[in-house]
Image (tube, grey):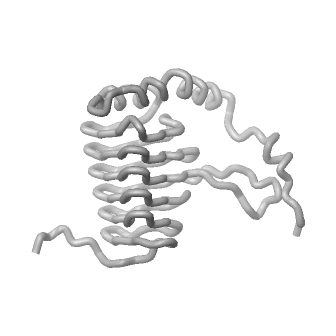
Amino acid sequence: MPDTLDIASNRTAQKYPWREMVQRVLWMVIGKPLFWISPRPLFGWRRWILRCFGATIGQGVNIYPSATIYFPWKLTVGDWSAIGEGAMIYNLGSITIGEQVTISQRAHLCAGTHNHTDPAMPLLKPPITVHDQAWICADAFVGPDITVGEGGIVGARAVVVKDVEAWAIVGGNPATFIKKRDLRNE
């Protein structure tokens, strides 16, 4: 086992194809500024900008201007979902958000990591999937290669490092099961 990291190899590795590098520059120079300066109620404008840059965005989706989306072409959001103020969509890998999903303020979905077992620590881009009717609460962190099941709730400031079952409520660091979600108003 090596006893030192090979940071030089990491820094010289090509992590993205040239086409994606060009897309990133265009997004940073044109798309992102138009997205960020748009007034809060102009959800349709932001949907349009994201679609122009390759995102798949459903109808009635509300994405707030202070949300950060790294690569629109790797984002899919279903109908009637929302991405709140200051949310971080770090989608080096694809992030798929279902219908009627709420990503609350300052939540962080992180679809990128490094292979810590390799001295060069190469970049990995595993996906994240958040199924229909789920809720990622304020300040929660959802790590790479995670699936949040239908109706699942990730509590405020929770750190999700394992899949969340359908209709489960999880919380804490690391997130653990709290109880099943019940939509009946009894």
Residue 161 sits above or below residue 88 on the image: below
Q: Quadrant of the C terminus?
A: bottom left
Residue 64 sits above or below residue 167 on the image: above
Image x and y of residue 54, in percent = 46, 31
- Residue 91 lies left or right of residue 49; in this view the side is right
Residue 15 sits above or below residue 136 on the image: above
Q: Quadrant of residue 152?
A: bottom left
Image x and y of residue 185, in percent = 12, 70
- Viewer-proximal residue among 39 and 123: 39
- Residue 52 lies left or right of residue 133; in this view the side is right
Image x and y of residue 56, in percent = 39, 36
- Tell me which residue sits at (64%, 54%) in the image: 113
Residue 153 sits above or below residue 49 on the image: below
Q: Quick one: which residue is furthest to the left in this view?
A: 186
- Viewer-proximal residue among 151 and 173: 173
Q: Quadrant of the N terminus?
A: bottom right
- Tell me which residue sits at (59%, 30%) in the image: 24
- Tell me which residue sits at (44%, 76%) in the image: 176
- Residue 27 lies left or right of residue 47; in this view the side is right
- Count of labels shown? 0
Q: Quadrant of residue 166?
A: bottom left
